[in-house]
Image: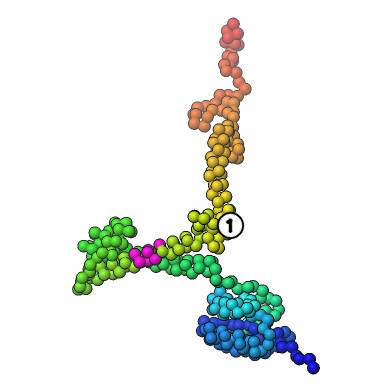
Amino acid sequence: MAHPQPPRVTVGVDTHKDLHVAAARDQLGRRLGTTMAPATSAGYATLLAWAHALGDVQAWGVEGTGSYGAGLARFLTARGQRVLEVNRPDRAARRRRGKSDPVDADAAARAVQAGEATGVPKAQDGVVEMLRALRVARQTAVKARTQAINALKALLVTAPTELREPLDGLATPKLVGAAAALEPGTLTTPTAATMLALRGLAQRYQHLDAEISLLTSRLDQLTTPDRASGAPATGCRPRQRRRAADRRRRQPRAAALRGRVRRAVRRLAGGGLLGQDPTAPPQPGRGSPGQRGAAPHRGRPAALAPAHPRLRRAAHR
């Protein structure tokens, strides 16, 4: 007696921050069931055990592998499961089938079976993920530092005169250092309260500046080639480095070439190479535009013969 083959299961997961909903279908497209589990390591293990109890798991279609589903995708990949990234269903399909977590999970499973979901989630375990995390921290620190110095300068505008005049006009590093050294004392006057606020903003700026410097140095360590061995850091692409070096070498050559072309064009008579009209030759009988006076008559001799016959005879003699 032949033993029946276990169904080949495809699982779709609709991920959320605290709870994941999964739906399973067999190789014929029949629904096998739905379940939900918390977004924790124990919940991931529960989902995996539930799927294996249904049959031979072929693939997982997970929504949001770059956000809420990142932990589940890493968990399943580490245990040898085939994980595919599923995009959110289009609006037309959601209007036809309704909107709920089990429906979205079932749509993810059907997208995998139909071959619509073919993307492999990012591993998120290399240098690129390290750079992403450090860049997020640095960008937020830079934004907060800018807000701190802007608030400090805005507060200084309305500060009391005896507090504003010594600090007004200082460069940012000197202003921050002077404001961080203020001693407000007992908070009994508006001047003391303003001094306390300025000192807090300046100290915040200093702390954020030190944090930014530390993060920048760590980013440089991950992206700068090893100077001792000459080898690139892990995750750097040699082709991109070669292209950047070629661009740096070509820039001075291109600038020098443009300078030679400009000098050659200036030496050309008429400048016709740049599309400028050559200087028109002066027309006979017409002076320059700035020259005033009547133009000479065209086609007439310089001296006219007298009109009277006697004068004409005297002129011919």
Q: Residue at x 54, y 49 (%)?
A: 248
- Is 99 positioned to the left or the right of 228 in the image? right
- Residue 139 at x, y percent in the picture: 45, 66
In the image, 278 versus 185, the foreground residue is 185
Q: Residue at x 57, y 79 (%)?
A: 75
- Is 150 positioned to the left or the right of 230 in the image? left
Membership of 212 in magenta stretch: yes
Q: Residue at x 68, y 76 (%)?
A: 116
For the magenta stretch, what is the residue range? 206-213
The chosen color scheme is: rainbow
- Residue 179 at x, y percent in the picture: 28, 63
- Is 116 positioned to the left or the right of 147 in the image? right
What residue type is disc 1 on?
Answer: Pro
Task: State whether residue 277 appears in this view.
Answer: no
Looking at this view, name the residue that lies furthest to the right. 1
Q: Quadrant of residue 104?
A: bottom right
Image quarter hosting the C terminus: top right
